[in-house]
């Protein structure tokens, strides 16, 4: 009997479960947002002067609340 077959007798997870766990870990690594990326995205925000004419209460009235 091959050694890998003997070791398979003691395996607690199936190969499919291991593949799913690896895929989940890879997805988690890809979705992690770094602080550097967040700070770089802040440069793309419009200037604060563009928001001075906006009012939250008038926006809520336009929603009918």
Image (cartoon, rainbow, N blue to C red):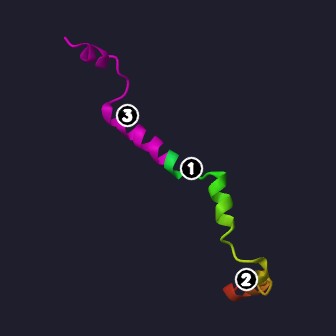
| Disc 3 element | helix
Q: CA distance from mark 3 to mark 2?
A: 50 Å
Mark nearer the N terminus (1 vs 2):
1
Proximity of marks 1 and 2: CB atoms separated by less than 8 Å: no
| Residue wearing tag 2 | 60
Q: Residue at x 36, y 35 (%)?
A: 17
Instruction: Please state the total of marks drawn on the protein image.
Output: 3
Q: Residue at x 76, y 81 (%)?
A: 51
Question: Which stretch is magenta?
Answer: 1-28
Q: CA distance from mark 1 to mark 2?
A: 34 Å
| Residue wearing tag 3 | 18
Q: Nearer the viewer, mark 1 or mark 2?
A: 1
Q: Residue at x 51, y 46 (%)?
A: 28
Give the vertical position of 47 relative to 34 (above or below).
below
| Left or right placement of residue 11 versus residue 41 in this view | left
Indicate yes or no whether the magenta region holds residue 5. Answer: yes
Indicate yes or no whether the magenta region holds residue 44. Answer: no
Mark nearer the N terminus (3 vs 2):
3
Mark nearer the N terminus (1 vs 3):
3
């Amino acid at each position: 009997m091959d050694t890998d077959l003997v070791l398979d007798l003691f395996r607690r997870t199936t190969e499919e479960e291991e593949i799913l766990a690896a895929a989940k870990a890879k997805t988690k690594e890809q979705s992690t947002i770094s602080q550097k990326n967040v700070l770089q995205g802040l440069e793309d925000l419009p200037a604060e002067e563009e928001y001075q004419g906006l009012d939250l209460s008038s926006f809520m009235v336009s929603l009918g609340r």
